[in-house]
Image (spheres, grey):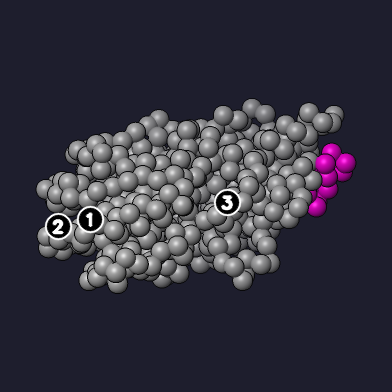
Amino acid sequence: MTATGKATQFEYKALHKPNQLIYGLGQTAVITGWTVKQAIAKHLQPEEYAVIGQLYSPTRGINLLIRNLLYNPHVRYLVVLNATKEDNNAGACQCLLDFFRNGFEEGVCDTGLRCWVIRSPIPGYIDLEVKASAIDALRESIKYQETKSISEAVRQVLSYAQEKALAARGLRLDFPMPTVKPTILPGPRYGHRIEGKTIAETWVKIIHRIKTTGTIRPTGYDGQWQELIDLMAIITDEPANFYFPEPNYLPIDRPFLKEYVSQILDDASSREGLKYTYGQRLRSWFDRDQIDQVIQKLIGEIDAASAVMNLWDVKDHEKGGSPCLNHIWLRVVDNELSLTATLRSNDMFAAWPANAMGLRALQQHIRDEIAGRSEYDLKMGPLITISQSAHIYDDTWDNAERLIANQYAAIFNQRSYYDPSGNFLIEVDGKEIVVTHTTPVSGEKIKSNSGEKIKSNSGEVIKSYRGKNPLNLLREICATSPAIQPEHTGYLGIELQKASNSIKNGKAYIQDQ
């Protein structure tokens, strides 16, 4: 019975993300956006609602929500809590409301797949497998209401609970989702290094690495993810105004980024239903402004190794909902400011580009503040993220595959041949191969036919190697310089074998010819 004595006989069953919902026995679905669902549920009785759930992303969440509603035809009311800055930034609740207000049309999603596109300025998609007639019937048979606060949402749910029970819209409708079975190649599970000039370029490389060798594991919620452990990404040359490819294949755009950066740089007051923002953790959570602390630390001791910001609270073990971003470290070396961030758990497909750009904005802010308050005019160094659990959720595997097919080859073919481990000059002296290892090329570089950049006076001689067996020489070189880039190692193996063959055949050897 409800609080008004009205009997109910409804049961909500979710096909998708069932463990992320709170279930009731009424006819109203409550969408809480970024507000935790328990903040609504604690004010209601189960008989007064059908289901309560959060909605973070319009591109990932609405498709599943629509499928769940089609499977539960007894739901006749919808309350959407669109209340916070985070909701406004993500746009998921607004896109859902636009779906009911404006409908949808056939089009393509951000990765080029045919789908139903919600008529909204915020991108939102529904699988084309879901029949248009079923979606139209759903829109016509559900009464919806947007609310702007927890109290208003609760009042609206209670108001709908007063209504006479309505008949179900029809039969349960189930439209099976397409499944993606990844092909996984052997590779290390722990410890990966990926480098790129921009966040966009590095992101594509990250997705390719995880999709190629990541381990498939069950998540702590629903479904699976593909995961690598301890993935270090290094971004060397992200421009100050950020690089967005054209057309933009990133899961974020400039308006989203503008709002997201404020969640990292700015403090936020405590609000019911919201756990924290990164800015709150950095600015006031521990009764200290940690951003200002590291600025003052570096101004006072520019080469300090203790410019640290921490977001993990020991109470997070007890309360749950702990931040994914845990630790930030800044360092100045050779007048260059680098930032290293550790994330314990990282959704690399949907979240990492925003994480990386937000951290880069923080790095730029700290550099500018140091310049404005002191005589130090630092250069922007690399941004490094260490993602301890670097994963892609199964509901984005298909999108990840298309991203790789559309972008990876072009990015890989634009790679630089510069190797910080140095250059190797190969010659033949009588019956022996001689390899001279020099420091990396600086200034103007010459590109050989192979792509290797070689100049006879390219740098200081570091070490020389001499021998007859090309494989033994290659092993000695790699043992001495284990950080040589893989392609450089392959190139050395080819040239050393050519030098060996020239000795056997009595012919002259010239590198790259």
> Is 407 placed above or below 348 here?
above
Q: What amino acid is found at the position of numbered circle 1 in the picture?
A: Arg
Which tag, 1 or 3, sits closer to the chain's start? Answer: 1
> In the rendering, at what x and y percent does residue 485 appear?
57, 50
Q: Residues within 10 Å of mark 1 (few under 14, many from 20)?
A: many
Measured from the top left, where is residue 142 in percent x and y? Answer: 22, 50
Q: How many numbered callouts?
A: 3
Q: How far across and how far down the image is residue 484, in percent? A: 61, 52
Which residue is under mark 3?
A: 271
Disc 1 from disc 3: Cα separation: 30 Å
Name the residue tied to disc 2. 169
- Report the residue marked by disc 1: 76
- Please, which residue is most extreme toward the front here? 4
**Is residue 56 highlighted in magenta?**
no
The answer, for residue 25, to whether it is visible in the render is: no
* Callout 1 touching callout 2 (CB < 8 Å): yes
**Residue closest to the eye, 396 or 450:** 396
